[in-house]
Amino acid sequence: MRWVDRAPAPSGVVHYAKMYTHLWVQYFQQRGSNPSQHNYWTVFAADLRECFNDKCGYCEQRFEPVGELQSSVDHFRPRSRFPRLVYDWDNWVSSCQRCNFAKADQWPDTGYVDPCAVDLLDQPEEHFDYVPLTGEIVPKSGLTHNARHRAQSTIDDIGLNETRLRETRFRLIGSFVQDLLLATPGADRFAVVSRYQEPSEPHVGVVKMFTNQLRQAGRI
Ligand SMILES: [Zn+2]
């Protein structure tokens, strides 16, 4: 997971918010019928997807046209619990179907780690570390109780350490290390780091975490 600049809301969002938010609020307060046909956030899916570099905001896999890696608009704070935010651009995360379904209506006491958090301390880079031997993402050491719970809930509930994801990250970091070792120290290594940290690359957040760990250990 890595921080994403969601950019300002497209101008049309306000219109939909004014027209349809109340229907969703009424529905979740059990005062109205299901407004599921008024799911116009899908109108903005492409704008959102562009901000997220065509990757899932949680698992960082590239979207695919069909299957569980199809893109969707996730309501970061779930609709059922925060119906007033149903048309809030700042509450939308471009997410694959897998992560969206896994997260579902859950919302732990501490919330989840927001890929677009504005406050530096709330951002993914302040919550997660990477374990090179296993490919796992883990909460950073030294976090406050709440931040640790937020990081662990994000990992567990969204399934960020699912076998396939762990293996993909493990292989990616393996080739990153190999390319680093083959490059001569200095400009060449810098070029390798830059290439793997291109915003459009999958799992760039993990590469960044690992690069920071290498830097802190004085290895690069
Ligand atoms: Zn995902």
Image (cartoon, rainbow, N blue to C red):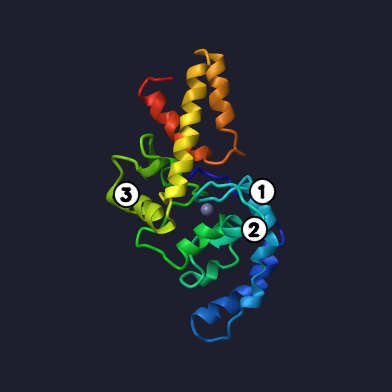
**Viewed as shown, does residue 195 lie left or right of 205?**
right
Q: Secondary structure at mark 1?
A: helix
Q: Amino acid at mark 1?
A: Glu
Q: CA distance from mark 1 to mark 3?
A: 30 Å
Q: Determine which residue is flagged by label 3.
A: 148
Label 1 or label 2, whichever comes before in sequence order: 1
Residue 208: give x, y in percent of width and height. 48, 34
* The disc label shown at residue 66, or none: 2
Mark 1 touching mark 2, by CB under 8 A?
no
Label 3 or label 2, whichever comes before in sequence order: 2
Q: Amino acid at mark 2?
A: Val
**Viewed as shown, does residue 212 lie left or right of 45?**
left
Residue 154: give x, y in percent of width and height. 40, 54
Residue 47: give x, y in percent of width and height. 68, 53
Q: Secondary structure at mark 3?
A: helix
The vertical placement of 112 against 204, above or below, is: below
Q: Secondary structure at mark 2?
A: loop
Q: Amino acid at mark 3?
A: Arg
Please say whether residue 196 is visible from this viewpoint: yes
Mark 3 touching mark 2, by CB under 8 A?
no
Mark in front: 3 vs 2: 2
Which residue is painted at 49% across and 42% down in the image?
168
Which residue is painted at 52% across and 59% down in the image?
98
Mark 1, other Cα within 10 Å: few <14 / some 14–19 / many ≥20: few
* The disc label shown at residue 50, or none: 1
The answer to which of 173 and 27 lies nearer the viewer is 173
